[in-house]
Amino acid sequence: MHEMGIVSGILSSAVDAAEKEGASKINDVRISVGVLTEIQDFALQFAWESLSPGTIAEGAELVATFVSPVSKCSQCDTEFEHDRFEIVCPNCGNFVCEQIKGRELTIDSIDID
Ligand SMILES: [Zn+2]
């Protein structure tokens, strides 16, 4: 389950950032997850519950916002949301599109005490 490694990275980044701020506790960590990463929320939560105890993030909530895929058409520059499988420009029907959202995995904010 690759979520373990991902959450481990998120956790250590969050703990590093919080400790630099002199925090003694993390209350919640908010992340954005692109749908195309195939990461599942339950797996994130499971990994978080497994890894955060014993750190200053123990008891903190991991809040994931899932980001729909967005592509940009190479012909007409239209940007459009789509599902995981069908990527066709709604304006001109072109299939050659550049993925601009949907694969991200970023920490948006960390709430600390
Ligand atoms: Zn187009």
Image (cartoon, rainbow, N blue to C red):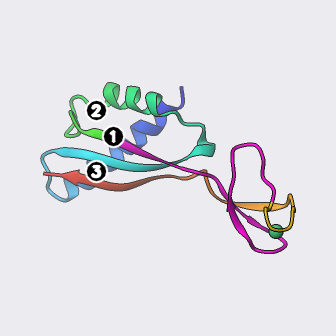
- Mark 2 lies on residue: 52
Q: Secondary structure at mark 3?
A: helix
Residue 48: percent from left, percent from top: 35, 32
At x 21% / y 34%, what residue is drawn? 58
Residue 2: percent from left, percent from top: 54, 31
- Quarter occupied by residue 55: top left
The mark nearer the N terminus, 2 or 3, is 3
The mark nearer the N terminus, 3 or 1, is 3
Looking at the rendered structure, which numbered label has been put on residue 72?
Answer: none
Q: Secondary structure at mark 2?
A: loop
The three-letter amino acid code for the residue at tag 2 is: Ser
The mark nearer the N terminus, 2 or 1, is 2
Q: Can residue 4 be seen in the rendering of this structure?
A: no
Provide the residue span drawn in magenta: 63-88
Q: Which residue is at the front of the view, 48 or 70?
A: 70
Q: Answer above or below: position of 14 versus 60.
A: below
Measure the C-alpha gap from mark 3 to mark 1.
16 Å
> Number of callouts in the render?
3
Label 2 close to label 1 by CB (< 8 Å): yes
Measure the C-alpha gap from mark 2 to mark 3.
13 Å
At x 28% / y 39%, what residue is drawn? 61
Give left or right: position of 74 versus 25: right
Q: Can residue 104 be seen in the rendering of this structure?
A: yes
Label 2 close to label 3 by CB (< 8 Å): no
**In the image, is residue 58 part of the stretch drawn in magenta?**
no
- Mark 3 lies on residue: 16
- Mark 1 lies on residue: 62
Badge 2, how many Cα within 10 Å: few under 14, some, many 20+?
Answer: many
